[in-house]
Image: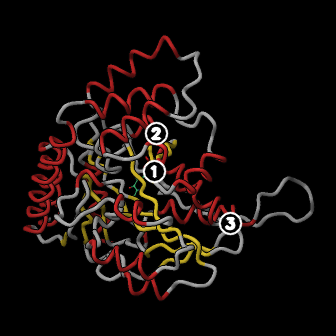
């Protein structure tokens, strides 16, 4: 894992200088994908979904190859219509992006910026920090309870300058989920001019009975946004498609500044087809629920603490950074890549994606060998 180094900037006019905010940012470290000298890699570092891209999405992707000279539909009209039909949402209030990462960034620039405060939880998704800082805002990381967003602490951290509160719902990398009553309490306790962003990248995996991915609060007012993605359950991380459902006024603002053709032609085609794949989400959710529980139980059986997760991944706790590093190295020696958590201030933890049954078995075997030896 590489850390961004703060470099002193020359003040002598010898070269162009980035804004100070840019140099405060630690570049995002993506999940690793390769181990030198290892042929078969088990990649469980990026929560990509256990089953690859839906077959219908692959076919749609191949089919548009002859049309690549055409600009995409700049408004992602067909995709927004399909999303609206699938979840019963008004397509006019959906905005699509180059991954939900782009929407996070746009929201920070549109509602944050110099002088603004942006709140996130201590172990929240790093993109909020990167995009918020880039916008010029101050990003405040609020302490958590049991690696879960602490609504009381969040409300106490609000300042007159607070403009945006980000909550990943459930959170990545911790996997933890706030009960709906706590989400409601958060919204009710925030001033109406503060935008609450519920980032529900893992919505399709959630089993909690009271779960609402954000739709309810979006519809209840003018100050909540729900973000979703095709990168997790729909297996299209490489295509970069995300979307948000939001109040009309927020959609209007984002549409003024987003890339005019932000979602490319192949991505739109693949995403629409992914939505049409029969039974896909149900199959993936059922697999994930079964294997998330089995994987957690077998890791706990060999003495690894596992935090409760509603996502397609587990936050595993090795108590010390040294032990987590050792486990990471041991897994790598067997061709298994998981995610180190130092960048999330959880150096004693590893995040492990719930893969196929075989992959779950291989991780379990490796970690039990590690814990015994
Ligand atoms: C993966 C992830 C995203 C980003 O997804 P993209 O659509 O691929 O940009 C956003 N938020 C959370 C919490 C995630 O885990």
Q: Secondary structure at mark 3?
A: loop
Residue 57: x and y in percent read: 33, 27
Specify which label sits upstream in the sequence, 1 or 3: 3
Residue 354: x and y in percent read: 21, 51
Residue 335: x and y in percent read: 27, 44
Residue at 26% x, 48% y: name it: 336
Q: Is residue 143 left or right of residue 138?
A: left
**On the image, numbered disc 2 is attached to which residue?**
240
Q: Secondary structure at mark 1?
A: strand
Q: Relative to residue 11, is residue 64 depicted above or below? A: above
Callout 1: 10 Å neighbours few (<14), some, many (20+)? Answer: many
Q: Which mark is residue 113?
A: 3
CB at disc 1 and ligand 1 closer than 8 Å: no
**On the image, numbered disc 1 is attached to which residue?**
244
Specify which label sits upstream in the sequence, 2 or 3: 3
Q: Secondary structure at mark 2?
A: loop
Q: Is residue 159 left or right of residue 22?
A: left
């Amino acid at each position: 894992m590489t850390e961004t180094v703060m470099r002193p900037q020359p003040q002598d006019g010898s070269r162009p200088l980035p804004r100070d905010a840019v140099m405060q940012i630690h570049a995002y470290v993506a999940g690793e994908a390769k181990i030198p000298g290892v042929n078969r890699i088990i990649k469980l570092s990026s929560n990509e979904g256990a089953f690859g891209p839906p077959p219908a999405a692959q076919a749609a992707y191949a089919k548009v190859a002859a049309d690549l000279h055409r600009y995409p539909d700049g408004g992602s009209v067909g995709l927004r219509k399909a999303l609206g039909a699938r979840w019963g949402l008004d397509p006019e209030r959906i905005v699509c992006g180059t991954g939900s990462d782009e929407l996070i960034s746009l929201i920070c620039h549109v509602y944050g910026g110099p002088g603004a405060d942006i709140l996130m939880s201590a172990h929240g998704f790093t993109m909020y920090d990167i995009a918020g800082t880039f916008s010029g805002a101050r990003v405040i990381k609020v302490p958590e309870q049991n690696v879960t967003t602490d609504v009381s602490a969040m409300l106490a951290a609000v300042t007159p300058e607070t403009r945006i509160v980000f909550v990943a719902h459930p959170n990545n990398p911790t996997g933890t989920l706030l009960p709906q009553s706590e989400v409601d309490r958060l919204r009710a306790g925030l001033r109406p001019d503060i935008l609450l962003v519920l980032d529900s990248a893992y919505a399709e995996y959630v089993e909690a009975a009271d779960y609402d991915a954000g739709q309810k609060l979006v519809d209840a007012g003018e100050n909540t946004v729900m973000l979703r993605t095709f990168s997790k359950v729909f297996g299209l991380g490489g295509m970069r498609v995300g979307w948000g459902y939001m109040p009309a006024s927020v959609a209007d603002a984002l549409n003024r500044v987003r890339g005019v053709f932000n979602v490319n032609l192949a991505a739109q085609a693949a995403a629409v087809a992914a939505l049409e794949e029969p039974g896909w989400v149900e199959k993936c959710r059922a697999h994930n629920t079964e294997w998330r529980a089995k994987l957690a139980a077998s890791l706990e059986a060999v003495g690894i603490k596992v935090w409760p997760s509603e996502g397609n991944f587990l936050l595993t706790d090795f108590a010390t950074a040294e032990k987590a590093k050792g486990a990471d190295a041991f897994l790598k020696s067997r061709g298994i890549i998981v995610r180190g958590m130092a960048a999330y201030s959880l150096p004693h933890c590893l995040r492990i994606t719930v893969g196929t049954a075989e992959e779950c078995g291989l991780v379990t075997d490796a970690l039990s060998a590690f814990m015994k030896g």
